[in-house]
Amino acid sequence: MPDLSLPDDLKTGTPLDAYLELMPVISLFYQGLLEFDGDKGELERRSRDFEERFLPGTEEGVNDGLYLPWVLFDLRFGKSKKTVCERFLEDRTLGKVGEPALTFIRPHVGQLCHLL
């Protein structure tokens, strides 16, 4: 796995550091769900619906920074109705995520997007 740690010059010494280190890892997990998960069809449809309704990244749409936190931490989909982040936490590969990010993420699964 590539080194996705936050460079020292970008660290703030706050919980935001853990959030920023986790975003690329959880985003990669999301890409895997889009490609291989049994609920990928619903995930794709719900993501596309958000983009069509709220036009992230466009002048008339919502801030582009709202989409990724929504799709990773808030969108419940599939039979389990779990978020991407909840599925990530249950995945066996989670052991590859280092500290302090692992300790930080567990109690804040549904609330990480509110740090920004």
Image (cartoon, rainbow, N blue to C red):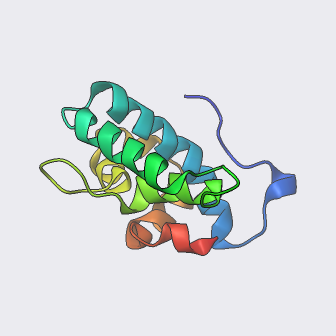
Compared with 5, 86 (above or below) is: below
| Place of residue 2 in the rendered image (x, y in percent of width and height, measured from the top left) | 61, 29
Residue furthest out toward the right? 9
Q: Which residue lies most toward the left here?
A: 79
> Is residue 11 left or right of 89 when viewed as pictured?
right
Residue at horizontal 64 percent and vertical 60 percent from the top: 63
Q: Position of residue 8 (x, y in %)?
A: 82, 53
Viewer-nearest residue: 114 or 5: 114
Q: Quadrant of residue 115?
A: bottom right
**Which residue is at 60% across, 57% downward?**
61
Image quadrant where one finds the N terminus: top right
List x then y, in percent, for residue 96.
46, 41
Q: Is residue 92 left or right of residue 60?
A: left
Residue 108 appears in the figure: yes
Find the residue positioned furthest to the front: 60
In percent of the image, x 45 and y 54: which residue is there? 53
- The C terminus sits in image quarter: bottom right
